[in-house]
Image (cartoon, coloured by chain):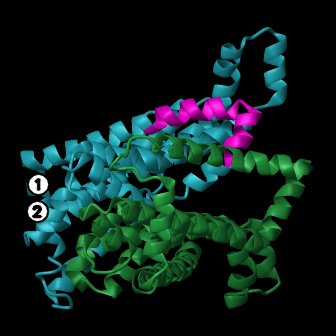
Chain colours: A green, B cyan
Amino acid sequence: MKPLKTLGYVLALPVLLVLLWWASTLGAVNFFVPTPATLVAKFGEVWFGPRFFSDVLPSLGRLLVGVVAAIIIGVVGGVLIGSVKWLRALLEPTLEFFRAIPPPVLVPVLILLMGITDSMKVAVIISGCVWPVLLNTIEGVRAVDGVLSDSAHTYGIDGWARVRYLVLPSASPQIMAGVRQSLSLGLILMVISEMFASSSGLGFTIVQFQRSFAIPEMWSGIVVLGLLGVAMSFIFQWAERNILRWYHGQKEVENAA
Amino acid sequence: MSADALTSGGPVSSAGRDRRQVRKFPVKQVLGLAGILGFLGTWELIPRLGIINERFLPPASEVIVALVRDFGLTAFWIAVVETMTAWFLGLVIAVALAVLLGFVIGSSDFLRKATNSTVEFLRPIPSVALIPLAVLLFGVKIESSLMLITYAAFWQVLIQVLYGVADIDMVANNTAKTYGLGRMARIRYVVFPTALPYLMTGVRLAATVALVLAITAELVIGSPGLGREIALAQSGGAISGMYALVLATGLIGVLINAVMRFIEKKTLSWHSSVRSEVIV
């Protein structure tokens, strides 16, 4: 009975909303809103064809490369800046300023510097996604437990071993919080970089549909982006659960006590 | 510049700390300033030494001159006002909607369970996915920006309000009930104070997101504001003007962060997290 009830809670509202949508498009044909059936048909037709390889995969590839590079740069830079006190004081105001620049304005700047290329789009994603990871890593490294740090020092754990076994684990909750932010930012920047100047990719295709008034196709593109966002958030939650298992366990123990 | 904006945020509450810093040599501030100057110096040198062509990356001095010139132009301020209007309206609409819905959903166990899957599904949808829809519905008007900003900011606030309302102390709530406080009075005196810190976090995050979306809408759709000016400057070849506008958006971002932190501090001055922060 219990799983059935849970399932009911999960499905009731979405089913209700789809029914509402279906009922409201039943009578008068609205130019802007397709019926659910049309949308599903168009969705299959548009996205499970050659377009999957020519537009969806390249976009995803750029997103993946950009986000992974941003995470690596952010973590390495963050550990470096976070561990050296004077470096942190030197760079912090400048970094805060860079973080405050809305990332989309970097699209025209990077087009100018690099031209309209794949590497430009990857650079846009990197330059936007790196800040949440970098600043969170700095915070995390800075907040390493003092007793742990001294103990490690006493046992002669220094250099790489210190980073690997002390600094990275204790900063990892913060790092994951940064990664979560930069994932959603990365998706936004991927779309924008393709909408602004491109001849392929998801963002370009959707804008193209909109400009040619192919309304159901445009909606199907919006659905693709939505599904992508949802999928990324699920993958992230799964990864976070695995990476931070010890942390959540520790939290539970602390809260129970 | 950014350091100025940050320290001028709370003249009253940080007065005590400032006095302490005067006695000590302000190493941190000096280093921070050196960092900014070093960055500007590097930027100045890269085009001057010809590492990157001056046509694509003008030296820092040129850009700063262009920025200062912008400060004297009416057109610049009109664009700033347009961007900030869209930002403010979108943020206010999003916060109002999210607070209303958040309190209604959050205070009912049934509604919370029933909406959970829908919220979790709609939340990660990137708001830029709505750009074509906004163009179709509203064209290059402020409504397009408002739609994107509201959508993006709404979820940030809603999630926080939901967490906040769920965090309510049952003992406090039951005590209020025993003392005969009605439903509205309990929302006002028990639920609202509990949720306020969460709400402020949500608003602070939403303010940043709203600026990003405001600029994006202007850049991609072409609704009036700083973003459109940047796109125009780039396609018109006014390169140092474009860099100046990019710097201006950064300054606005820093300013918004500082103002939001200040408001958070003021509204939550009674809360233990802020109180302890001030004492230490």
Q: Is residue A201 above or below residue A174?
A: below
Crowd around label 2: few <14 · some 14–19 · many ≥20 (10 Å): some
Q: With A157 as the anchor, is A199 left or right in this view?
A: left
Q: Which residue is mark 2?
A: B66
Q: In the rendered structure, the residue with mark 1 lies on which chain?
A: B
Magenta segment includes B135: no
Tell me the kind of residue under disc 2. Answer: Ala
The span shown in magenta is: B94-116
Residue A23 placed where, x, y %? 52, 41
Picture quadrant where residue B216 is located: bottom left
Q: Is residue A62 above or below residue A226?
A: below
Return the chain for callout 2: B
The answer to whether marks 2 and 1 mark residues whose Cβ atoms lie closer than 8 Å is yes
Frontmost residue, B43 versus B55 = B55
- Residue A3 visible in the picture: yes
Query: Which of the two residues, B154 or A220, is positioned nearer the viewer here?
Result: A220
Who is closer to the viewer here, B60 or B214?
B214
Question: Is residue B103 part of the magenta span, yes or no?
Answer: yes
**Furthest residue to the top?**
B180
Q: Residue furthest front?
A: A27
* Kind of element beneath mark 1: helix
| Quadrant in which residue A164 is drawn | bottom right
Give the tally of numbered discs: 2
Q: Which residue is mark 1?
A: B70
Q: Are marks 2 and 1 on the same chain?
A: yes
- Say which residue appears at 60% left-offset and 35% top-offset: B102
| Mark 1 surroundings: few (<14), some (14-19) or many (≥20) residues within 10 A | some
B119 over A196 or under it: above or below:
above
Q: Looking at the picture, how far across and down is residue B76, in whole percent?
A: 13, 50
